[in-house]
Image (spheres, helix red, strand yellow):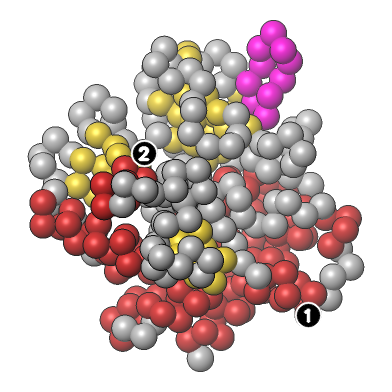
Amino acid sequence: MRLIDVSSWAGDDQHEIFPVGARDKKMIWSPSEVVNDGLKCRWPYLFKESISRYPDQFWTEVIAYIISKHLSVEVPLAYPAIYTDCDGQHFGSLIEWFYDEKSENFIHAEQFFKRINPDFDEKLGTQHNLRDLKSICRFLKQRANLQNDILLWLSDIALFDCLIGNTDRHQENWGVIFKPDNTSFLSPLFDNGTSLGHERFPSRVAGWDENRLKQYIDKGQHHLRYVRDKPELRIKLYDLIKMLAGNEKLKTYMLNKITSFDIVAALDEISELTSIECEVPFSKERFDWVSRIISMRFKLIKEVFK
């Protein structure tokens, strides 16, 4: 993996500045010829910067993509990138657009929640809940030929978000892709930047022992609630795995995934990011912190199945 210079990539007239989310982002188009890197030619990509107080946050998107490959969960490709303009150099993650805007249509989950609950809290998503999510997906199965196995898709979310500690899978961070052949699919798991302890400065957590680290990890909660009328009850990351594992089929599915996950290979690939020359680097200190988090989370997930 290398740092991709996208300074010469064309902007998108319709979505030059992308409005969804907290971080600065813009849609750009890859050139007609792209050398290796697995990038598509003439395809839209999102260039996504970090929140100013956490300048190296963009690396979390790249790391999440690496983890998804080893966990066999569908996540859009992400690379570190640089964009230079009259204001100087900008560093961010380059994320592949996950549907074809010319032939496909994507609708954020929020639109479906608003259909069944006109008073849905758009700002905070406090009524974003598991019960309504299942109802929406059942409706899409009946009316929009939804192709996914809903519970397997939820199992992927449970494992992936728990492993990276993603607490921000809100109603605008997933949705439905409608295909021209009248089928539909639940989206890949995009927008994974609020994870992997990005908000912690490595120098301040280097001295944490295992108990302190576990306390920090145990606080992690999904954005999802259990039900609509109890917005204070967010589902803890590990509790969603436990809940789904009550179904023997899903337990076997998740156990096979976590057993096949090669944490050594994943961490080796992540460690290679420290060798990429960049003015906002993925430092060895940051890698040590991320490595500790992933290793502890992986250990705790395996204990769920014991």
Residue type, mark 1 in image = Asn
Q: Is residue 132 left or right of residue 15?
A: left
At mark 2, the secondary structure is: loop
Asked if residue 150 is positioned above or below residue 299 in the image, the reply reads above
Please tell me in which quadrant of the rendered image residue 158 appears.
Answer: bottom left
Name the residue at 69% across, 66% down: 293
At mark 1, the secondary structure is: helix
As drawn, the residue found furthest toward the top would be: 86
Asked if residue 68 is positioned above or below residue 299 in the image, the reply reads above
Q: Which mark is residue 211?
A: 1
Give how far apart the Cα atoms at labels 2 and 1 are: 39 Å
Give the magenta part as a residue range.
Answer: 82-93
Q: Nearer the viewer, residue 72 or 163?
A: 163
Residue type, mark 2 in image = Phe
- Tell us which disc is closer to us: 2 or 1: 1
Q: Is residue 109 magenta?
A: no
Q: Is residue 113 left or right of residue 275?
A: left
Q: Residues within 10 Å of mark 1 (few under 14, many from 20)?
A: few
Q: Is residue 25 left or right of residue 206?
A: left
Name the residue at 38% across, 25% down: 43
Residue 249 visible at all: yes
Name the residue at 45% across, 29% down: 45
Q: Which residue is mark 2?
A: 98
Please tell me in which quadrant of the rendered image residue 216 appears.
Answer: bottom right
Q: Nearer the viewer, residue 242 or 37?
A: 242
Residue 31 visible at all: no
The kind of secondary structure the magenta stretch mainly shows is: strand
Please tell me in which quadrant of the rendered image residue 49 appears.
Answer: top right
Q: Nearer the viewer, residue 253 or 192?
A: 192
Q: Which mark is residue 176?
A: none
